[in-house]
């Protein structure tokens, strides 16, 4: 979602093969352990009008499978996508 916002693409239909993610987004109050993440998610999804997320079967999710296979073939020690690095990574760099 952040990538689409950065590219100023607001008309997107998000699809996932994770049915639990769709349930979490649809009924966030039933997932109290993810309150912080859901707040960030709510702020992010306001950019998309209308916001749509749908469940697709894993067999239909060929793009994600292709990306995952391609990534496994690339030599990489670590890939991290976020604007703020995790604390453990900062701790390692300062040691």
Image (tube, grey):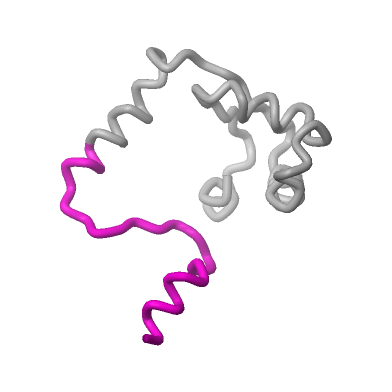
Q: Is residue 78 left or right of residue 23?
A: left
The quadrant in which the N terminus is found is: top right
Outermost residue, right side: 29
Q: How many marks?
A: 0
- Residue 24 position, x and y percent, is 70, 31
Q: Is residue 73 left or right of residue 89?
A: left
Task: Please say whether residue 87 is one of the residues in the magenta stretch.
Answer: yes
Which residue shows up at 47% across the image and 13% down it? Answer: 57
Closer to us: 42 or 9: 42
Closer to us: 81 or 52: 81
Which residue shows up at 61% across the image and 30% down it? Answer: 21
Residue 64 found in image quarter = top left
Task: Please say whether residue 56 is one of the residues in the magenta stretch.
Answer: no
Which residue shows up at 61% across the image and 21% down it? Answer: 54
In the image, residue 59 above or below residue 37: above
Q: Is residue 8 left or right of residue 91?
A: right
- Residue 42 position, x and y percent, is 75, 45
- Residue 94 position, x and y percent, is 40, 86
Closer to us: 21 or 94: 94
Magenta range is: 70-95
In the image, residue 26 above or below residue 94: above
In the image, residue 39 above or below residue 56: below
Residue 10 found in image quarter = top right
The quadrant in which the C terminus is found is: bottom left
Which residue shows up at 52% across the image and 65% down it? Answer: 83
Outermost residue, bottom side: 94
């Amino acid at each position: 979602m952040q990538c689409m916002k950065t590219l100023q693409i607001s008309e997107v239909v998000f699809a996932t093969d994770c049915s639990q993610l769709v349930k979490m987004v649809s009924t966030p109050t039933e997932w109290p352990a993810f309150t912080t993440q859901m707040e960030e998610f709510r702020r992010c999804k306001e950019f998309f009008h209308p916001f749509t997320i749908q469940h697709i079967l894993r067999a239909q999710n060929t793009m994600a499978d292709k990306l995952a296979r391609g990534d496994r073939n690339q030599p990489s020690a670590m890939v991290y996508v976020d604007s703020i690095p995790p604390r453990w990574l900062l701790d390692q760099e300062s040691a």
